[in-house]
Amino acid sequence: MLMALGLFVFSIPTLAFDDLSRKASYRHASSQRVGARDATQFAGIGDETVSIGGSAFTELGEGEASIAQLRAMGETGAAWSLVDGTGAVWGSYVIQTVDEKRRAFWPDGTPRQIDFALELLRVDDGTGIGRAA
């Protein structure tokens, strides 16, 4: 298991990603000062997003069904727990986007390769409980 989003497990039979990026932002309010740099004050934790991308190959798994499952999860609007393969809990995330690109088709129109990308947005309370290190 590479990672799990709710009950969806990222692995070779489902979707094995080959890139993952995580972005966290922090809000700072600023006030202008004459003759000096702006004064800033930490205003809280901003958005945290995770981007997951890769390719699924017909010969190795059920990429089409897995992408359909992720779309169905996204359509619920529910937040899903994100846990990596080491067991670290990253928090609760909603699915913002599911992108797919189908390539290299079999004669019947079935894609041999599906490139996919997911955008997840963290939505839990931000207390830090269960945050991955």
Image (spheres, rainbow, N blue to C red):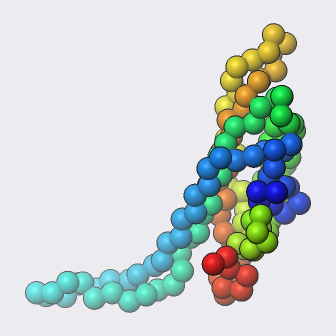
Look at the picture and state if 122 lies above or below 12.
below
Residue with the most extreme front position: 86
From this viewpoint, is residue 82 visible?
no
Residue at 72% across, 32% down: 114
Quadrant containing the N terminus in the rendered view: bottom right
Look at the picture and state if 32 lies above or below 96.
below
Q: Report x, y in % for residue 3.
A: 77, 59
Residue with the most extreme left position: 35
In this view, the residue in front, 45 or 20, is 20
Q: Report x, y in % for residue 52.
A: 65, 52
Q: In the figure, is residue 118 to the left or right of 81?
A: left
In this view, the residue in front, 64 or 13, is 13
Q: Report x, y in % for residue 29.
A: 38, 83
Look at the picture and state if 87 lies above or below 113.
below
Quadrant containing the C terminus in the rendered view: bottom right
The image quadrant that residue 90 belongs to is bottom right
Residue at 75% across, 36% down: 56
Q: Report x, y in % for residue 85.
A: 77, 64
Look at the picture and state if 51 lies above or below 84.
above
How many numbered marks does the figure carry? 0
Q: In the figure, is residue 127 to the left or right of 47?
A: right
In this view, the residue in front, 32 or 19, is 19
From this viewpoint, is residue 31 visible?
yes
The image quadrant that residue 23 belongs to is bottom right
Residue at 67% across, 59% down: 120
Q: In the figure, is residue 32 to the left or right of 61?
A: left
